[in-house]
Image (cartoon, helix red, strand yellow):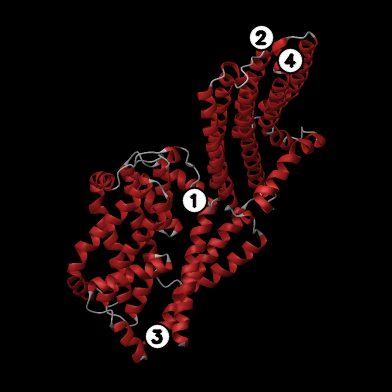
Amino acid sequence: MTTLLNLLSALALLVWGTHIVRTDVLRVYGAQLRRILSTSIKRRSLAFLAGVGVTSLVQSSNATAVIVCSFVAQGLVTLTPALTIMLGADVGTALMTGVLSFDLSWISPLLIFGGVVVYLSRRHTSIGRMARAVIGLGLILLALEMITAATRPMIQGAGIKVLFSTLTGDIVLDALIGAIFAMLTYSSLAAVLLAATLATSGIISLKVALCLVIGANLGSGILALLTAASQNVAGRRVALGSMLFRLSGAIVVLPFINYLEVWISLLTKDLRFGVVAFHVLYNTVRCGLLLPLVDPMARLCTRLLPELQKDDDAAIAARHLDPGAIDTPSLALANASREVLRIGDLIEKMLLSLLPVIRNNDQLRAQQIRKLDDDVDKLYTAVKMYLARVSREELNDKEVRRWTDIVTLTINLEQAGDIIERIVKGIENKKIAPQRTFSDAGMTEVCEMHARLVTSLQLGLSVFLDGDLKSAQKLLAEKEAFRDLERAYSKTHLIRLAGETQQSIETSSLHLDLISDMRRMHSLFCSTAYSVLDDAGMLRRSRMNVGDDPVAAQARQEFGDYSHPP
């Protein structure tokens, strides 16, 4: 029992080490790695090499699959180069398995000790995160040594030999067990290295080890399919194509497994080297032969997974909130920023539809505004839940400020949508139903405020996107001017009332509510200037506090502790 527990703990340590390396490399270099993948699609050879290189760094073809599937789902990469990258990823993970199969146990203590020293002193920096990845690599090497030590007593155990003897004889069953183990450990690398170690110890035969290796490749493909299940049809096609490539390789090779066992036995007496070499050669040859077939495979996957007819819900689903980027805060925040800008576009559409409702009593536009507000609410919820999943501990000071900016703008835009919907309801109840009209002067004032409101929304989104200081200053000045304009138009409206203008008397309450609501919306749109001006030291503390308090209260209500990440 103790021997079995030692083996299980060593396997757990191996899986944990690969997880640490994958996670921290993606957190530090995730943006660069994704840029490499997205810009290497012009030539097939570059796409293949990009898949090899990125997967070698993160030590997980499944991690590469998550990235590539999200690219295709967002329309950034087409299916053919994505399948090419995935073939390269299969070769990359095989090469890393070959490297880790060498006896590097002597370097493991150095990696762990050095990594811990650097990590404890630079914990919240990129260097500290890479030090954690170094610790993970040291744990992988330590785990491999522990697995070797744990399997030695098993050679003498009759019960263990009987247990593993059930794996011999049925190549399909052995491959299935290899696939299941790769899925349970979330790593084909762990499955292959364990198979090599067990074969070296004599616990399983070389034939069984080779079947486990082929099964581990299939298990990795199944993992990619399960991970891509949350993507749209385009993203799922990548995982399907990669799985079909792996399955075709297994179908071709498994019938010849007996011959391969004999050939490997003749070429080398080192079974560990033989199993790992087979894994490397199998994936390299398979992917090399399948590389010319990526175009037919892309067409096949398109037929097997046709595009579904879009409905209304699909049209307003979040497009940029890639779950695979959660472990890379900079990418997650960039994705959230893009989705918030999309909310801003919906608010602009609502504003442009609002003027015909006010001026022409357009009921059709009023219905469209309500539908757009529902879309804004759905995207707002999606962004809120996405930001809540971003680890606060992994955010540096700059990322914390960006997180706060995204939260602030998200809340402000959602509130602006509610204000527009409230304006529409007021127009229907107080103007359209009783068949009243604004005076010509009043309508002119509303049109001018509306035009400036749209312009400020566009400028506010631009400031949020690029953080331009001059634009932020212009936006804050426009806020002052808009507030003065609202006061002036309130006075002119009162003058018209004093002159007993019939139209002004009938629509007085609606008119004052309308320009007041426009001023509130304008303040929400201008809030993006605060962060830029504050960073430049040009914002008065009293003004920032007054402007930020309502948003901070809303953030605490909607996001809890996340409203102030450390």
**376, 251: nearer the viewer:** 376
Q: What residue type is labelled 3?
A: Arg
Q: In the image, which is nearer the foreground, mark 2 or mark 3?
A: 2
Q: In which quarter of the image is residue 274?
A: bottom left
**Residue where numbered disc 1 is placed:** 323
- Under circle 3, the secondary element is loop
- Under circle 4, the secondary element is helix
- Under circle 1, the secondary element is helix
Instruction: Say the numbered circle drawn on residue 152.
Output: 3
Above or below residue 401? Residue 347 is: above
Q: Earlier in the sequence, mark 3 or mark 4?
A: 3
Q: In the image, which is nearer the foreground, mark 3 or mark 4?
A: 4
Q: Earlier in the sequence, mark 1 or mark 2?
A: 1
Q: How far apart are marks 3 and 4 (CA)?
A: 95 Å
Q: Which amino acid does label 1 sit on?
A: Pro
* x then y, percent, for residue 111: 54, 67
Above or below residue 429? Residue 74 is: below
Classed neighbour count for the residue bearing mark 2: other residues with Cα under 10 Å, few (<14), some (14–19), many (≥20): few
Going 74% across and 40% down the picture, which residue do you hit?
Answer: 550
**Residue where numbered disc 2 is placed:** 440
Q: Are marks 1 and 3 in contact (CB under 8 Å)?
A: no
Q: In the image, which is nearer the foreground, mark 1 or mark 3?
A: 1
Q: Earlier in the sequence, mark 1 or mark 3?
A: 3
**Residue where numbered disc 4 is placed:** 505
Q: In the image, which is nearer the foreground, mark 4 or mark 1?
A: 4
Q: Which amino acid does label 4 sit on?
A: Ile
- Under circle 2, the secondary element is helix
